[in-house]
Amino acid sequence: MPSKKFLPTNQVALQWNTRGLIAGVDEAGRGPLAGPVVAAAVILDERNPIKGLADSKVLTARRREKLFDEIRAKALCCSVAQATVEEIDAINILQATLLAMRRAIEGLRLKPALVLVDGNRLPQLPMRAEAIVKGDSTVAAISAASILAKVTRDRWCAELDDRYPQYGFARHKGYGTAAHLHALRMHGACPQHRRSFKPVAEVLL
C-alpha cells in the first residue's frame, strides 16, 4: 500500500491567513476504562522532515516507537501532558481530554501562532485554533502528536501491568475487552480505574 501523503502545514485549508509556528495536537486514551488521557502537541521542522508519519492507530507498535524517538529528535519542539483518572471522574472524559490538550500546548517551549487539533472540539486557547476531523491522517504535525500520545500512554499501561498484572493492561491498554471486563468482575477495580465509566461503576455497586 502506498504511503499516505500529508498536506504541507501551509496548505491546510484554514478560515484565515496565519504566519508563524503551527502546532499539531492529538490525544490517546479517551475510550479506555483505566488510566489518564494523554495529549501531545508538536511543532515540526519543515526543513527536517520525518518519513512515515501516519495516524498512530494504523502503525505497528515497533514503528510507533521508532517514530517516537525521531519526532522527539527532529521536531522544533513537542510537549506531552495528561489529565488524571481523578480529573476524568470529576469533570468527564471530554473536558479532561480538552484539559490535557491545553496542558500539552502550554508546555511547548515555542508558542505557536496556530494550533490544529484532531477531531471536532477545541480546548480554550489564547491563540488561533482549528479542529480537523481525521487530522491525524492528513496533517503531519497532528500525526506526530498522535504517535507521541499513543506511545506515552502505552508505556504507562506497561508500567501499570507490572503493578496490577491480574488485569492485563499491557495487552488491552485499558480498553473494555472481554478479558478486562472479566478481570474487573473477578478482582474489582484498582486505583487507576475510571469510576465514572459504567463497566467500572457496575463492579463497585
Image (spheres, rainbow, N blue to C red):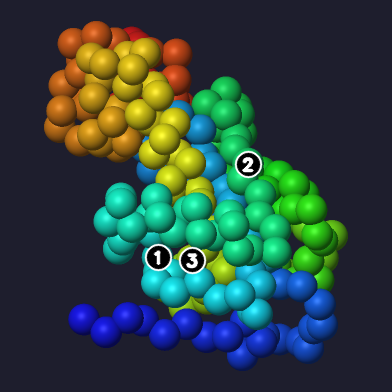
Direction from residue 173 to residue 195 in the image, left or right? right
Instruction: Tell me the SS state at disc 1.
Output: loop
Q: Are the residues tagged 2 and 1 within 8 Å (C-beta)?
A: no
Q: Which of 169 and 177 is in front in this view?
A: 169
Q: Circle 3 is placed at which residue position?
A: 143
Q: Are the residues tagged 1 and 3 within 8 Å (C-beta)?
A: yes
On screen, residue 157 above or below 100? above
> What's the residue type where badge 2 is placed?
Ala
Direction from residue 70 to residue 185 in the image, left or right? left
Give the alpha-carbon distance from disc 2 to disc 1, as whole Å.
19 Å
Q: Which of 192 and 1 is in front in this view?
A: 1
Give the alpha-carbon distance from disc 2 to disc 3, as whole Å.
16 Å
Seen at 32% across and 36% down, the residue is 173
Q: Circle 2 is placed at which residue position?
A: 81
State the image coordinates of residue 6 (x, y, percent, origin top left).
Answer: 47, 82
Q: In which quadrant of the rendered image does the N terminus lie?
A: bottom left
